Image: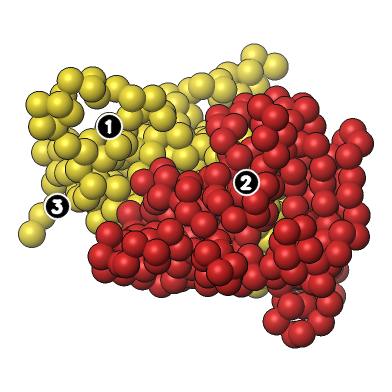
Amino acid sequence: MYSNAYIFRYASIMVILVAAVLSAAAMLLKPLQQRNEAVDKMQSILSAAGIHDVAAEDAIRIFNENITNMIVIDNKGNVVDDYTGEGKEKSRAFRINLKDELYKKSQNRDFELAMYVINLNGELIYIIPLRGVGLWGPVWGNIALKDDFNTVVGVTFGHKSETPGLGAEIETPIFEDQFPGKTLFDEQGTFKSIRVIKGGVANLPSAAQLHAVDAITGGTITSNGVGDMLKNVLESYEPYFKNQG
Amino acid sequence: MSTAKQEKEPLFSPKNKKLLTSPINLNNPITVQVLGICSALAVTAKLKPAFVMAVSVVVVTALANVIISMLRNGIPPRIRIIVQLVVIAALVILVDQVLKAFVYDVSKQLSVFVGLIITNCIIMGRLEAFAMGNKVWPSLLDGIGNGLGYGLILLIVGFVRELFGSGTLWGYNVIPAGAFEIGYMNNGFMILPPMALIIVGIIIWIQRSKNPELFEEN
């Protein structure tokens, strides 16, 4: 029979050993993991601007070749940081944690936002990272705008755990291809965002059709989440857009 | 001297071979013992995640069996389940970290299910039933065998579901475009978890009808 002291010793040593092994593994693998996350983010940013299917090995090179500016703005629309050098994955704009910044926004505190500028065949395209909530977990994405800060060039969406076949359809081309050509502002310059609506865009008055896309059947809460995400994030950029216009 | 040599069991004696092969068919953890069904439903919509899950489980069952078998004489019986859990959890976290570092896209697809290997009752079952009472080498074989038996079923289910549900295998299109033009459609039902249960049921049916040993007396 084992004594209590033996059991305690055994458990303590085991726990300390396991903790040491796991911490060592986490520290050793961290650089690789962070690189993978950065590559994934870059692929998504490039894809929103229309550069699809970038291989993971080339992502950092292609990202640095194409992206010209990494901009950080504050909530009053002022440019805080504008990085144009090499190694854009280390820039301040790339490292901004949108989740934290949106939390600050919800608390009415000052916050900062990122924006990536890409020069595609002489045309400047502005890419804005998005983040919101779906039904089961976070949803995120990127939206690319023309230099009028109004017309959408493209979007990509992603999600953590939306229902396959329903909410998860937001990351399919069927949903994403509705966005190019839509506009954020109406003719009077009022911010309209892009709504994700039930009942069919085709049934709306023609002026409103530019500010709406069809929701996903059976994915109401995810669709609403995407609509809220677009409005919540893009309205924060409105002061900046106004400053530029 | 010579007698000692005779007593030493060869590495792949018939008994040891059986440890490796019996879980693949007659004592399969999924179809015969009906363990580990939850993850079999969750990760088999596509072949690639099913394969990575299978490899991960083989690694975890084999290593956990070896470690527990090495420790088996020192583990206090009163806390043996906790010790087993710590070993499994540590290995699963390691696997998860390695996947995140080297195959990020697959790790994204598997998401929470890698963590759920911890709750896969096959692993704990083998530790408690086998590794606690056997030497290191048989335990390694038993772990690999059970992992392979689990993985085999995962791959079969993943193959059927991806082929008929998405029209692809390992992400590549295999159904010719012409078939879609004449009215062939992917079966969306295959993507959903219940279909995995039905396929596992069909596998069990076929296996039992071929193996009279598995007939149950009513």
Q: Quadrant of the N terminus of chain B?
A: top right
Q: CA distance from mark 2 to mark 3?
A: 69 Å
Are the residues at dot 2 and dot 3 in contact (C-beta closer than 8 Å)?
A: no
Front-most of residues B218 and A204: A204
- The amino acid on which the numbered mark 1 sits, given as a three-letter code, is Gly
Q: Is residue B162 left or right of residue B150?
A: left
Is there one chain holding both mark 1 and mark 3? yes
Q: Residue furthest top?
A: B2
Tag count: 3
Q: Is residue B77 left or right of residue A34?
A: left
Residue A58 is situated, as x and y percent measured from the top left of the image, at 70, 25
| Residue at the disc numbered 2 | A146
Are the residues at dot 2 and dot 1 in contact (C-beta closer than 8 Å)?
A: no
| Residue at the disc numbered 3 | B216
- The amino acid on which the numbered mark 2 sits, given as a three-letter code, is Lys
Q: CA distance from mark 2 to mark 1?
A: 37 Å
Which of the chains is red? Answer: A
